């Protein structure tokens, strides 16, 4: 076939075709490479983006678990409210983006249309509250206070209210069971912040905060938040590019949170709260001879602890507030009121966050320190009306003198000079102003052994540790303040504080004799919290074991099964043997019968022979303020501690209140008769409450009503057993209050002064009020 | 010196009729490139699944019939296959004689789109509605017209044995023939199609053996034109952003940037084996716009994964490889030019379309040959396959 040409190509064309082929191959190779880069190398990135694209989560909040008292009474529960919510997705499908629907809704609810629109808009950088910070796919609550009638109007006219629902929803409610307030112990909830949501976005389960979650911010609500919160139900909806739902990818029903059983007894709590309030109101009617005005009694706290377990039976803090203010979001006005100086910070739990000098309630520690340092319990120690230490005179209250007395008697009558003498002796042995290399420091050491200067570890948030003003603290305090002191000293002023500054600038780090002897009677820079004192006096009552204070007893599932028991936790033992404990037991009982508190106990009809109580009073002086009242007490089963800031003396300020608390606990009337039927809690509740299958607690019918206010329940007596109470009141200071944190509540001393009542035999001495740092400690040996 | 035979001297097949003719030893049936045909058929038929997946949930497009686009796509493939068979049956040489008529017809169609007969879709005046839901996009056929007319003009003297390479005059005439449809398409305005046509012209100039100055001249003119448009500020910032959005979707987040970002998410999330046909979340959720036409490749990427997407590229590569082979083996320059023109067309259009889905090329509304839904594109593509087969079947039998 010779007439058919072999080819239509020349060499040039052939080369050009090869070029074309190479171009084609390189284009295809480019596509292949890019495809590999997207699909193989970066697959995970795009998979995540695709998921974010088409999955929308709708959160159904879990019902929060309840907080119960030791008998199963609900302290924090849930209230069913009619919540009207609006679906944005439905609104946006309306022609006018739902404006007309919202206006109609506002009309039905009796709210301004603007308010409703603002609640439904989405929060962003420019939009401030009110706005919705949750998912736009979530129904947005407009009101939690709808009436049944309003709900009916909405649900009956569905066509007028597309996307609007009214349904019953659980809202946190603090029940005030038996009249107990318990605000600071229970704490409160508030919505999560955007920040918290985004920070936990890649976590799962309880670790993840969801928009519109309410989480515990204080008290038990905060510490046991993970137990109480429950797991929200998350429905993962598949949506298309317009946000229309095209399917359900995953669905998980919400799981109700667990319930928390506490050791609180609501009835006892009510009694404690009422008596604290009564004591403070009584103090405000009492004239203070030192300042020539009535006591201010600005704040106070009280703790009732089960001495065998460290469990808290009642814990009150004053001033207090209504915890239901937080329900459904606190208003700005209310929040300001709660955090303002005028209200004196009612959010603080002063039982764990208030700290002040313990005054003479500290003397049980001093006694133990003396025994540890080698002083004999059988010895007799001089109690002169005054002592001169470092050129200064340290006097007993009202310059009383008891001669040579035992340590027991020194505790009973709260003789300061005995402890001055012991502390001074020790200070000298440790080298005085020029301490030897390894000083004994028995008083400071013992205070630390008693757990002072450290948190007790109670299961409540933001506990403060208090302070033991030992050598280490003095040094660091000096390092922190030296510059300020020296600067003031340079100015050469002649005022009192200038003089102190001048001395402190030179050797403020020194442990001076005055510091040492003041510490021995719980004054000076010492700070303790009521719960620390309750822990110590519980140990004295139970034979020397320290228990970590706890409020929660157990976590119970919504079905009533035990999830986790919070068992008592031993935290070591008191230093000192049984002989010493017996000795202190006897001395503190003496306080009730013949000591500083006798006029409020045996003197007021307390049946000490049947129910033995033990007590130590304390009256701490604070520079520029009135005295702090402390009363620390214990019976066989309970330690009861009360403190009132600017509340007078230990026994005078808190004596009646604590006696009445014991009267209610044991069913004792004002004449000393015992009616066990009226006793609120003659023994601490050891068992957990029983639960019905639906998770509700079975509450035993109350044997009698808790009308145990300050008046006290009274009835025919029946001996309950030997008990021994002690009470203490303390001044409570907000954490972070500069006046306190700086360590300068110049507490001068003063043991217990019966506040105006008839002094009972053996009242201890009031002591001269002196600035701690300047003169008191200047004793140069 | 090699002798260049004229097509006029070629022996025609013996006159036989019907089936015997089709099965005769020298019938085109035995000479067509079956590999090419198979690759094209697999691409076209396989893509019907992708089109189906992309459209079965788009009720606004399908009028409630999920298989609407599946059947229409298959119909298009069938019509395309028939057109292809007709072209093969006509044969390359005979087809050569009707090119001027085809060209004239395409020019008329193109002009009709600019007249009130045309309709506007996506801002482009590039469609003619035929009624009954059918419409024609003449720009697709203009690509054919350019390939055929340029081949005709440039190979005339060479295939007649008068010259070794196309004369400058012939090249110039061919460029004029090509420019006319390009200018009309530019008025629509359909810059994407013009871009494809320009590359076709470049491929044809390369394959024709035209002097180097024509090739480089065209490249320079193209680059110069782009620079001029850029420098003269003809384009607004919006248009520039839109153009650059393929590289940085943030430049045009609600428009083209959104498309490319969603396309990339769809493809990237497919991984090695894909999410399974009909199970792509991006596809089911309709996050990728124009997914059955310009962005059909993303369906393959998401639902069939790297393996499926790569299969499309490989099949396209097979078509191009066979096309290049046909260009090399063509018995005349006309056949070489036609084959090279088709290769340039498919190669660039495929690269641009897939590259746009992958975010390495700017967004232009041009379809992926064989795969995208669209009648005009499918028909012209299969006519081009017919042209390749016709060129192929005219070469001597196992000489």
Image (spheres, coloured by chain):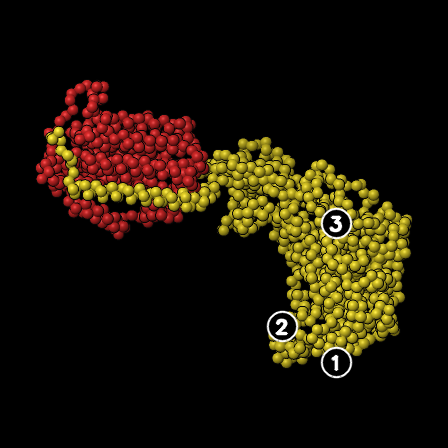
Chain colours: A yellow, B red
Q: Which of the image's four quarters has the N terminus of chain A?
A: top left
> Of discs 2 and 1, which sits in the foreground?
1
Mark 3 is surrounded, within 10 Å at the Cα level, by few (under 14), some (14 to 19) or many (20 or more) other residues, namely many
Of marks 3 and 1, which one's residue comes earlier in the chain?
A: 3
Q: Which residue is mark 3?
A: A264
Q: Tell me whether the residue at label 3 lies in contact with that at label 2, contact meaning CB atoms closer than 8 angstroms.
A: no
Of marks 2 and 1, which one's residue comes earlier in the chain?
A: 2
Q: Which residue is mark 2?
A: A479
- Compared to A480, does A697 lie above or below? above
Front one among A501 and A93: A501
- Compared to A52, does B92 lie above or below? above
Give the x, y percent position of residue A646: 75, 63
Mark 1 is surrounded, within 10 Å at the Cα level, by few (under 14), some (14 to 19) or many (20 or more) other residues, namely few
Question: Judging from the image, what secondary structure is the residue with disc 3 in?
Answer: loop
Circle 3 chain? A
Same chain assignment for discs 2 and 1: yes
Q: Is residue A5 left or right of residue A338?
A: left
Point out the residue furthest to the front here. Answer: B399
Mark 2 is surrounded, within 10 Å at the Cα level, by few (under 14), some (14 to 19) or many (20 or more) other residues, namely few
Q: Which residue is mark 1?
A: A781
Give the x, y percent position of residue A510: 69, 75
Circle 2 chain? A
Q: Residue at x 81, y 51 (%)?
A: A709
Circle 1 chain? A
Question: Judging from the image, what secondary structure is the residue with disc 2 in?
Answer: helix
Q: Residue at x 63, y 53 (%)?
A: A335
Q: Is residue A118 left or right of residue A364?
A: left
């Amino acid at each position: 076939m010779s007439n058919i040409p072999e080819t239509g190509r020349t060499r040039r064309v052939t080369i050009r075709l090869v070029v074309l082929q190479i171009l084609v191959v390189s284009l295809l190779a480019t596509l292949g490479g890019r495809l590999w880069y997207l699909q193989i190398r970066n697959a995970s990135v795009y998979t995540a983006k695709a998921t974010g694209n088409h999955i929308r989560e709708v959160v159904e909040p879990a019902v929060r678990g309840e907080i119960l008292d030791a008998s199963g009474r609900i302290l924090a529960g849930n209230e069913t409210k009619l919540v009207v919510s609006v679906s944005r997705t439905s609104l946006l499908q309306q022609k006018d983006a739902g404006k007309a629907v919202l206006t109609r809704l506002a009309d039905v609810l009796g709210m301004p249309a603007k308010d409703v629109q603002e609640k439904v808009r989405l929060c962003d950088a420019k939009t401030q509250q009110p706005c919705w910070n949750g998912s736009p796919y979530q129904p947005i609550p407009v009101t939690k206070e709808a009436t049944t009638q309003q709900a009916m109007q909405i649900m009956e006219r569905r066509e007028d209210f597309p996307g609007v629902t009214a349904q019953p929803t659980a809202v946190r409610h603090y029940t005030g069971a038996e009249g107990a307030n318990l605000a600071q112990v229970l704490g409160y909830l508030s919505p999560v912040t955007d920040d918290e949501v985004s920070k936990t976005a890649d976590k799962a389960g309880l670790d993840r905060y969801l928009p519109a979650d309410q989480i515990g911010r204080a008290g038990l609500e905060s510490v046991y938040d993970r137990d109480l919160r429950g797991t929200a139900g998350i429905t993962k909806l598949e949506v298309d590019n317009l946000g229309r739902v095209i399917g359900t990818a995953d669905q998980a029903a919400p799981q109700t949170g667990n319930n928390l059983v506490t050791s609180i007894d609501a009835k006892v709590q009510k009694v404690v709260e009422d008596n604290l309030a009564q004591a403070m109101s009584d103090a405000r009617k009492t004239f203070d001879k030192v300042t020539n005005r009535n006591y201010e009694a600005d704040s106070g706290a009280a703790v009732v602890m089960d001495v065998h377990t460290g469990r808290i039976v009642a814990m009150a803090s004053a001033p207090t507030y209504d915890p239901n203010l937080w329900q459904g979001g606190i208003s700005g006005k209310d929040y300001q009121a709660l955090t303002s100086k005028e209200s004196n910070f009612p959010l603080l739990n002063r039982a764990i966050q208030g700290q002040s000098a313990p005054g003479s309630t500290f003397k049980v520690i001093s006694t133990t320190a003396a025994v540890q340092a080698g002083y004999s319990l059988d010895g007799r120690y001089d109690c002169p009306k005054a002592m001169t230490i470092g050129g200064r005179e340290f006097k007993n209250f009202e310059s009383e003198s008891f001669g040579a007395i035992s340590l027991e008697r020194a505790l009973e009558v709260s003789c300061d000079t005995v402890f001055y003498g012991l502390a001074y002796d020790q200070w000298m042995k440790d080298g005085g102003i020029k301490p030897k290399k390894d000083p004994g420091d028995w008083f400071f050491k013992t205070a630390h052994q008693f757990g002072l200067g450290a948190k007790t570890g109670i299961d409540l948030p933001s506990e403060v540790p208090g302070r033991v003003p030992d050598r280490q603290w003095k040094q660091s305090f000096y390092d922190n303040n030296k510059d300020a002191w020296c600067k003031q000293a340079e100015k050469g002023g002649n005022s009192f504080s200038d003089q102190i500054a001048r001395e402190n600038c030179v050797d403020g780090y020194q442990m001076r004799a005055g510091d040492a002897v003041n510490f021995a009677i719980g004054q000076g820079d010492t700070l303790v919290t009521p719960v620390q004192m309750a822990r110590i006096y519980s140990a004295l009552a139970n034979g020397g074991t320290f228990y970590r204070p706890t409020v929660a007893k157990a976590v119970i599932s919504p079905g009533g099964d035990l999830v986790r028991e919070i068992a008592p936790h031993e935290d070591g033992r008191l230093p000192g043997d049984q002989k010493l404990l017996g000795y202190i037991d006897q001395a503190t009982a003496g306080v009730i019968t013949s000591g500083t508190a006798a006029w409020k106990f045996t003197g007021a009809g307390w049946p000490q022979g049947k129910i033995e109580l033990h007590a130590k009073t304390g009256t701490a002086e604070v520079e520029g303020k009135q005295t702090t009242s402390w009363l620390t007490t214990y019976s066989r089963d309970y330690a009861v501690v009360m403190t009132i800031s600017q509340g007078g003396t230990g026994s005078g300020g808190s004596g009646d209140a604590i006696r009445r608390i014991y009267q209610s606990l044991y069913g004792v009337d004002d004449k000393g008769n015992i009616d066990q039927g009226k006793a609120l809690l003659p023994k601490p509740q050891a068992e957990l409450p029983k639960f019905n299958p639906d998770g509700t607690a079975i509450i035993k019918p109350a044997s009698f009503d808790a009308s145990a206010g300050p008046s006290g329940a009274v009835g025919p007596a029946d001996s309950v057993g030997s008990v021994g109470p002690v009470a203490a009141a303390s001044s409570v200071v907000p954490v972070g209050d500069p006046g306190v944190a700086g360590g300068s509540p110049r507490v001068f001393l003063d043991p217990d002064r019966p506040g105006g009542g008839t002094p009972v035999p053996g009242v201890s001495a009031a002591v001269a009020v002196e600035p701690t740092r300047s003169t008191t400690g200047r004793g140069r040996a | 010196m090699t002798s260049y035979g004229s097509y006029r001297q070629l022996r025609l097949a013996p006159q036989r009729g019907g089936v015997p003719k089709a099965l005769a030893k020298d019938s085109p049936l035995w000479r067509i490139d079956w590999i090419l045909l198979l690759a094209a058929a697999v691409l076209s038929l396989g893509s019907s699944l992708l089109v189906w997946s992309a459209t079965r949930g788009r009720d606004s497009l399908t009028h409630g019939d999920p298989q609407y686009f599946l059947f229409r796509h298959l119909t298009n493939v069938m019509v395309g296959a028939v057109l292809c068979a007709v072209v093969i049956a006509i044969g390359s040489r005979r087809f050569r004689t009707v090119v001027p008529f085809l060209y004239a017809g395409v020019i008329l169609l193109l002009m009709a789109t600019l007249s009130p007969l045309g309709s506007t879709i996506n801002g482009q005046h590039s469609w003619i509605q035929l009624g009954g839901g059918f419409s024609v996009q003449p720009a697709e056929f203009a690509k054919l017209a350019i390939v055929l007319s340029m081949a005709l003009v440039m190979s005339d003297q060479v295939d007649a044995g008068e010259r070794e390479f196309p004369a400058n005059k012939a090249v110039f005439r061919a460029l004029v023939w090509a420019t006319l449809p390009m200018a009309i398409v530019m008025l629509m305005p359909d810059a994407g199609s013009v871009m494809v046509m320009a590359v076709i012209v470049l491929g044809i100039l390369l394959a024709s053996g035209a002097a180097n100055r024509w090739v480089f001249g065209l490249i320079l003119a193209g680059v110069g034109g782009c620079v001029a448009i850029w420098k003269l500020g003809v384009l607004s910032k919006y248009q520039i952003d839109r153009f650059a959005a393929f590289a940085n979707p943030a430049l045009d987040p609600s428009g083209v940037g959104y498309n490319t970002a969603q396309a990339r998410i769809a493809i990237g999330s497919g991984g090695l084996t894909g999410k399974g046909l009909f199970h792509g979340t991006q596809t089911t959720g309709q996050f990728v716009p124009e997914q059955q036409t310009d962005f059909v490749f993303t369906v393959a990427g998401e639902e069939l994964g790297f393996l499926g997407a790569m299969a499309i590229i490989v099949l396209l590569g097979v078509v191009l490889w066979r096309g290049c082979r046909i260009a090399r083996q063509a018995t005349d320059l006309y056949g070489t030019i036609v084959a090279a023109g088709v290769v340039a067309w498919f190669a660039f259009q495929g690269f641009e379309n897939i590259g746009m889905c992958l975010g390495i090329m700017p967004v232009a509304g041009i379809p992926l040959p064989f795969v995208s839904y669209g009648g005009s594109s499918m028909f012209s593509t299969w006519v081009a396959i017919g042209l390749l087969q016709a060129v192929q079947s005219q070469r001597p039998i196992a000489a």
